[in-house]
Image (cartoon, rainbow, N blue to C red):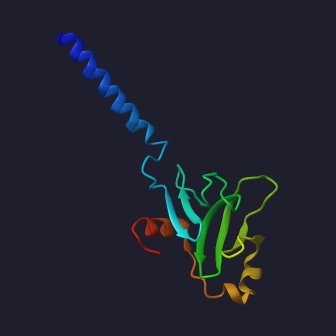
């Protein structure tokens, strides 16, 4: 009888331990994805890289790569794509239209500076923005 209880306790303990270790790879509580604006969210991956995503949890995200800086206004998202997912793509600035969801880029910094509709967008490191969104900020 005592042995049966010990085995049952051990089995329960292993099950709980398995669930907790799975939580490292599976975000059970949705804390790795933070809603940003419209249908877009920032997703932090293992290692701290950040992607701009929609409801599809694709590690490449909607910009086909990770982002290092990001900002937005009521019309546009401006993000610096740091690491493209595909070898034939390059780093650079990406622009997302919040109304049409059209994605433009990558652009060089000079092009971004020449576009007046992007002038007032405050850029911050993507991880700083993700942490701010996680704590309820913008």
Of residue 18 and residue 123, the one placed in the foreground of this image is: 18
Left or right position of 3 against 106: left
| Residue 125 at x, y percent in the picture | 54, 70
Residue at the farthest left position = 2
| Vertical placement of residue 22 versus 7, above or below | below
Left or right position of 92 against 77: right
Residue 77, by quadrant, is: bottom right
| Residue 12 at x, y percent in the picture | 30, 26
Residue at the farthest right position = 88
Of residue 114 and residue 43, the one placed in the foreground of this image is: 43
Report the quarter where the N terminus lies: top left
| Vertical placement of residue 77 versus 31, above or below | below
Residue 23, by quadrant, is: top left
Of residue 124 and residue 136, the one placed in the foreground of this image is: 136
Residue 31, by quadrant, is: bottom left
Labels in figure, total: 0
| Residue 89 at x, y percent in the picture | 79, 59
| Residue 119 at x, y percent in the picture | 65, 87
Q: Residue at x 66, y 69 (%)?
A: 80
Of residue 21 and residue 99, the one placed in the foreground of this image is: 99
Q: Residue at x 35, y 32 (%)?
A: 17
Q: Residue at x 34, y 26 (%)?
A: 14
| Vertical placement of residue 75 versus 19, above or below | below
Residue at the farthest bottom position = 116
Q: Residue at x 76, y 52 (%)?
A: 86
């Amino acid at each position: 009888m005592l042995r049966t209880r010990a085995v049952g306790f051990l089995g329960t303990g292993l099950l709980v331990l398995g669930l907790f270790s799975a939580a490292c790879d599976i975000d059970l509580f949705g804390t790795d994805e933070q809603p940003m604006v419209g249908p877009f969210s920032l997703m932090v991956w293992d290692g701290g890289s950040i992607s701009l995503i929609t409801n599809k949890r694709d590690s490449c995200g909607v910009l086909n790569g990770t982002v290092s800086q990001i900002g937005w206004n009521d019309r546009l998202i401006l993000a610096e794509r740091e690491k493209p997912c595909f070898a034939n793509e390059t780093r650079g600035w990406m622009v997302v239209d919040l109304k049409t969801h059209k994605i433009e880029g990558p652009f060089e910094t000079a092009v971004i500076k020449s576009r007046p509709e992007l002038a007032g967008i405050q850029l911050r490191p993507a991880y700083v923005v993700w942490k701010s969104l996680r704590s309820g900020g913008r």
